[in-house]
Amino acid sequence: MFDSIDDWLIIAVVAGILFYGSSKIPQLAHSLGRSVGEFKKGRLEVEREIKADQANQTTVASSPSGPAH
C-alpha cells in the first residue's frame, strides 16, 4: 500500500497539517531550509579545513629534513 516515497510524503504532509495547523507549515519549512543551509555551510568549512591540513602535511613531509650545515 505504501510502496513509494510519494505515499509517505503525502502522509507526512497530512499529519503535519493535523498536528501543527496550516499556518505553521510555512514557518516550519522556512526553519528546515535554514537548518539545511547552515549544515551545508558547516560541512563545507570542515572539508576546507581538512584539505588545508592535508596540504600542510604534504608540504612538511616533502620539505628536506635533516640538519642544514
Image (cartoon, rainbow, N blue to C red):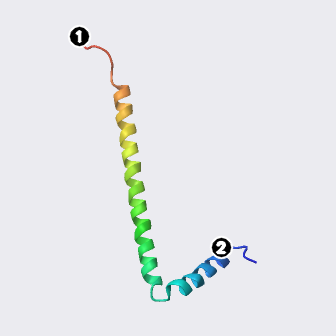
Give the mark nearer the N terminus: 2 vs 1. 2
Instruction: Classify residue 2 by image quadrant.
Output: bottom right
What residue occupies the far right of the structure in this picture? Answer: 1
Q: Are marks 2 and 1 in contact (CB under 8 Å)?
A: no
> How many labels, in total?
2
Q: Residue at x 28, y 13 (%)?
A: 67
* Closer to us: 19 or 55: 19
What residue occupies the far front of the structure in this picture? Answer: 19
Q: What kind of element bears circle 2?
A: helix
- Quadrant in which the N terminus appears: bottom right
* Closer to us: 48 or 12: 12
- On the picture, is 8 further left or further right than 32? right
* Closer to us: 65 or 3: 3
- Quadrant in which the C terminus appears: top left
Q: Is residue 30 above or below residue 22?
A: above
The amino acid at mark 2 is: Ile
Mark 1: give few (<14), some (14-19) or many (20+) Cα within 10 Å: few
Where is mark 2, residue-wise? 5
Q: Residue at x 43, y 72 (%)?
A: 33
What residue occupies the far top of the structure in this picture? Answer: 69
The amino acid at mark 1 is: His
Q: Is residue 38 above or below residue 48?
A: below
Q: Which mark is residue 69?
A: 1
Q: Is residue 38 above or below residue 12?
A: above
